Amino acid sequence: MTSVDPVLCCRNVTKRFGAATLAVDDVSFSLNKGDLLGLLGPSGCGKTTLLRLVAGFERPESGEIELAGQTICGGGQWVPPERRRVGVVFQDYALFPHLNVAENVSFGLKQLCRRGELPKQQIKSLMGEAIALVGLAKMARRYPHELSGGQQQRVALARALAPRPPLILLDEPFSNLDVQVRLYLRQEVRDILKNIGASGIFVTHDQEEALAIADKVAVMNEGRLVQLDQPEEIYQHPASRFVAEFVTQANFVTAVKSGDRWDTVLGRARGIPGEGDLMVGQEDLKLTADEQGDCLVQARQFLGREYQYALLMPSDQVLQVRTAASQRLAVGDRVSVRLDCERVRFFPKEGEPIVLGRRQNFAV
Ligand code: ATP
């Protein structure tokens, strides 16, 4: 296996705002060259602050940040933001309204040139390449107000990419866009970054977006980095109940001991190793229309390719279930439920989650 150099290393980075807010709490991670990392977590968990620390807009209390082999922060070093080779794409695009597309994209290049970091003759070609890369070559003379939201976001991306920095940071880049535009632009941005081998970090609180386009997903909670892994791993093997709830939106079902078995709202089970909760994926519950069934369809949402049902259990717990669009049930229908046990995970009161699987004889 060939080893890939990291483009970014954060070591024990901590940032406080006043005494009360620990926005980023002892965060360490590294990002490999060419990878796209999605920073995911609930509002206020520190995603933007971590991005701003990497960009140099904030100074950490402690920790070190290394970019492309150079320490940019920590150990007595401090490289100011304009000298860090990172491109930043902001949520609101932050384009200059009085400059056209070409001028917006070449703005940063001219500054580099003024500081002697870029030969003047390269400005035009770098600007042209960046505009072509985002598919706006025909709109180079337009002003921001003459562009759609998606086009403005592409200009912001072109501006960040133009100097060919080793790292691009994107702060909720798609959140101001209509859902349709968001869906195709997020794939397009990924393709553009991949085509030129750029590394990137994007902030999002949309788990589907993170899973869809990132090579790695970092989940944050209350300033801490709680799991960093490939999207599939995060989804299938969440390291904690927090990650499971935030990322997979699974159901949690408590197991209560009753003799040598365990009672759950889905029936009785054997082989559960102790007190705790079962994580049951929305797609792991199989429904059958059954007039004698104990469960009631309480709500239904049609999601295009599938249905999402809210199912009222006899215990009054409501479970979320996803089925193929071919399984159409009506609100008020009675159903029976079967659990596909293969992927059930068990979260003990203390300690690491365990995959139960069929061996555990979870007979509901
Ligand atoms: P969101 O998804 O809502 O944008 P986030 O995960 O990006 O949230 P941050 O913006 O990084 O979260 O904020 C982390 C914590 O730090 C929050 O409690 C926030 O109120 C606080 N915070 C952020 N910036 C400042 C600041 N300049 N001064 C004081 N507190 C701040």
Image (cartoon, rainbow, N blue to C red):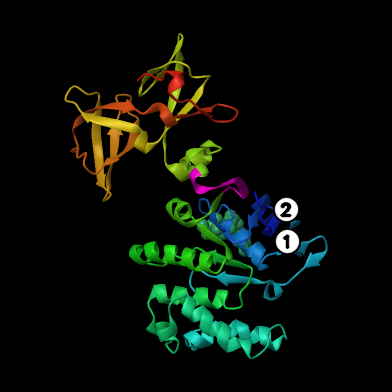
Quadrant (top left, top right, bottom left, bottom right) of the C terminus: top left
Q: Quadrant of ligand 1?
A: bottom right
Q: Nearer the viewer, residue 102 or 251?
A: 102
Magenta segment, principal secondary structure?
A: strand
Please give the name of the residue rendered at 64% of the width and 68% of the height, measured from the top-left corner.
Answer: 166
Mark 2 and mark 1: Cα distance apart in space:
8 Å
- What residue is at 52 percent from the left and 67 percent from the top? 193
Q: How many marks?
A: 2
Left or right: 322, with 240 as reference point: left
Measured from the top left, where is residue 214 in percent x and y? 51, 55
Residue 167 vertical placement versus 96 (above, below): above
334 vs 61, nearest the viewer: 334
**Kind of element beneath mark 1:** strand
**Residue 173 visible within the image:** no
Numbered badge on residue 66: 1
Asked whether residue 177 is drawn in magenta, I would say no
Please say whether residue 275 is visible from this viewpoint.
yes
Q: Which residue is mark 2?
A: 11
Mark toward the start of the polypeptide (2 vs 1)? 2
- Relative placement, left or right, of 160 versus 311 is right
Q: Is residue 229 magenta?
A: yes
Q: Measured from the top left, where is residue 277 in percent x and y?
A: 47, 27
Q: Position of residue 52 (x, y in %)?
A: 63, 64
Residue nearest the observer in this picture, 47 or 285: 285
Q: Label 1: how many residues lie within 10 Å, few (<14), some (14-19) or many (20+)?
A: some
User: Residue 241, position in %: x, y?
Assistant: 52, 36
Q: Given the image, on which type of amino acid does mark 2 rest?
A: Arg
Dot 2, crowdedness within 10 Å: few (<14), some or many (≥20)? Answer: some
- The magenta-colored residue range is 219-232
Could you tell me if the residues under marks 2 and 1 are in contact, i.e. CB atoms within 8 Å?
yes
